[in-house]
Image (tube, rainbow, N blue to C red):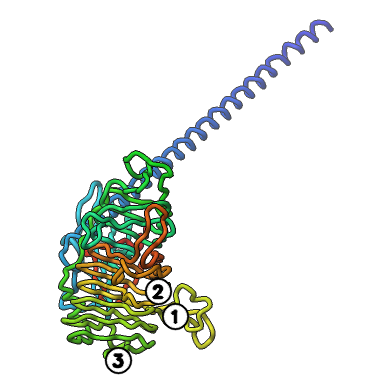
């Protein structure tokens, strides 16, 4: 009995060893299979990541090439002395730039500029530049579009070529407490402030400092004499900006595009969709540019329903309010701004006043005068007649812009008190429609401004 039991145990032990060995072997196979599968998956993911990274880099390279093409196309446009035209003046058209595809880095780009139809009654044209870039190796295409338009002087709420008064070379123009300028402001000279004038739009000046009467350490280097001045630049200020040249004083383009040219001193009144020229009515729609040659243009005011530019090679004299039929400052409540269904419509009333000489406000003009227009004095200034003898007349409300060669005097203030003692206090507001609109054939700066950028 004892011998049989021993034999039985000896028979069982080898079977157990075999089962355990098989289990270990199976486990090892499973571990190896898992590791192989994991390694393969890791290699596959790494390969995908590498391909994704390569493609992302290639897309970025294509984008860089497209950006380079846009930059070159912009330089090409800015380098031209005048805007490009379509072959045979057949508009619109697409011009391929640089003779075709251009190599850049690991790829190439091709640039096309779309020329607009010649805009009737406008000096503002838009140009869309489209650049398509491709890369070598992994083929990737990227298209970028950039829209520019000719920059009109009408886009400025305030522009001064010289920061001093025309006949007083040592007398500067000061923006003081209570004065407000809304919209883009540029000076080819220096900005002078007293107290806390407000500038709603972006400000740029060629000077590297702001001249503050009492000192303003943030913007000038003079020793402050408290109380410091505190100009309020809502949209920032750029010091040391590039100068912007005034247009040719001959005003040839404006005169050549005038549908009505009148000689000698001329009186003009605004009468809705008509204008009265020396008492004779003319439709604004068919006479968007009126030019007075060899004489002053006397504007007796009124309301304008339409788009009109009045120009002269002498002076413009303003005798009364100049307003739009649909008041863009109060379009929600102005009945003239509603269509036959009572819906508020986009106001298209727009006026430009352009004089080779002065644009003057008559000393008989009413108090709290309103002028809704873009005003330009190419060689001289915008000023109030007899400004040293006119008593305080409240605010001069200009909705649009003032562009002048020399600063003109519209009012005098006492620097000790900040109170006006003669003329008007400035109340200048920007017409935001002028960001992309301009009165008919209003002079341009010779530059282009960005309108839209798209990554397609």
Measured as percent of width and height from the top left, residue 150 is found at 26, 67
Frontmost residue, 103 versus 16: 103
- Do labels 2 and 1 touch, CB within 8 Å? no
The Cα atoms of the two marked residues, 3 and 2, are separated by 26 Å
The vertical placement of 202 against 115, above or below, is above
Q: Earlier in the sequence, mark 3 or mark 1?
A: 3
Answer with left or right where residue 310 lies relative to residue 37: left
Residue nearest the observer in this picture, 92 or 181: 181
| Image side of residue 318 versus residue 243, left or right | right
Q: Is residue 110 something one can see in this rendering? A: no
Above or below, 435 against 198 in this view is below
Residue at the disc numbered 3: 282
Q: In what element is the residue under mark 3? A: strand
Query: Which residue is depicted at the point 52% across and 30% down?
Result: 35
Where's the C terminus, which quadrant?
Answer: bottom left
Q: Quick one: 170 or 237, which is closer to the camera? A: 170
* Residue 238 shows in the view: yes
Dot 3 crowding, Cα within 10 Å, few <14, some 14–19, many 20+ = some
Residue topped by disc 2: 369
- Are the residues at dot 3 and dot 2 in contact (C-beta closer than 8 Å)? no
């Amino acid at each position: 009995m004892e011998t049989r039991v021993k034999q039985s145990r000896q028979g069982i032990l080898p079977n157990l060893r075999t089962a355990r060995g098989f289990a270990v072997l199976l486990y090892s196979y499973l571990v190896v299979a898992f590791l192989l599968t994991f390694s393969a998956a890791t290699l596959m993911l790494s390969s995908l990541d590498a391909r994704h990274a390569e493609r992302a880099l290639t897309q970025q390279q294509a984008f860089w090439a497209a950006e380079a093409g846009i930059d070159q196309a912009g330089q090409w446009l800015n380098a031209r002395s005048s805007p490009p035209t379509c072959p045979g003046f057949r508009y619109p058209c697409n011009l391929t730039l640089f003779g075709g595809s251009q190599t850049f880095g690991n790829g190439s780009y091709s640039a096309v500029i779309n020329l607009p139809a010649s805009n009737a009654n406008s000096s503002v044209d838009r140009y869309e530049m489209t650049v398509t870039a491709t890369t070598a190796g992994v083929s990737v295409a990227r298209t970028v579009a950039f829209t520019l338009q000719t920059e009109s002087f009408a886009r400025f709420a305030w522009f001064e070529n010289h920061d001093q008064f025309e006949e007083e070379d040592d007398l500067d123009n000061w923006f003081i407490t209570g004065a407000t300028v809304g919209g883009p402001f540029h000076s080819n000279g220096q900005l002078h402030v007293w107290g806390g004038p407000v500038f709603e739009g972006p400000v740029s000046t060629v000077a590297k400092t702001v001249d503050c009467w009492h000192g303003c350490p943030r913007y000038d280097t003079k020793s402050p004499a408290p109380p410091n001045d505190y100009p309020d630049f809502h949209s920032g200020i750029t010091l040391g900006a590039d100068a912007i040249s005034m247009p040719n004083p001959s005003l040839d383009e404006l005169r050549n595009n005038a549908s009505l040219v009148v000689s000698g001193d001329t009186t003009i009144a605004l009468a809705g969709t008509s204008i009265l020229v020396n008492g004779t009515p003319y439709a604004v729609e068919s006479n968007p540019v009126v030019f007075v040659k060899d004489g002053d243009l006397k504007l007796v005011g009124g309301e304008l329903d339409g788009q009109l530019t009045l120009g002269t090679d002498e002076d413009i004299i303003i005798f009364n309010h100049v307003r739009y039929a649909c008041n863009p400052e109060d379009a929600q409540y102005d009945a003239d701004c509603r269509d036959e269904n009572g819906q508020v419509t986009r106001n298209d009333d727009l006026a430009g006043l352009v004089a080779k000489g002065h644009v003057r406000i008559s000393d008989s003009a009413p108090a709290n005068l309103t002028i809704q227009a873009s005003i330009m004095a190419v060689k001289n200034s915008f000023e109030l007649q007899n400004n040293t003898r006119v008593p305080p007349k409240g605010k001069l409300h200009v909705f649009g812009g003032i562009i002048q060669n020399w600063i003109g005097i519209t009012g005098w203030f006492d620097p000790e008190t900040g109170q006006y003692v003669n003329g008007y206090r400035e109340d200048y507001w920007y017409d935001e429609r002028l960001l992309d609109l301009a009165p008919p054939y209003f002079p341009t700066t010779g530059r282009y401004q960005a309108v839209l950028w798209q990554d397609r």
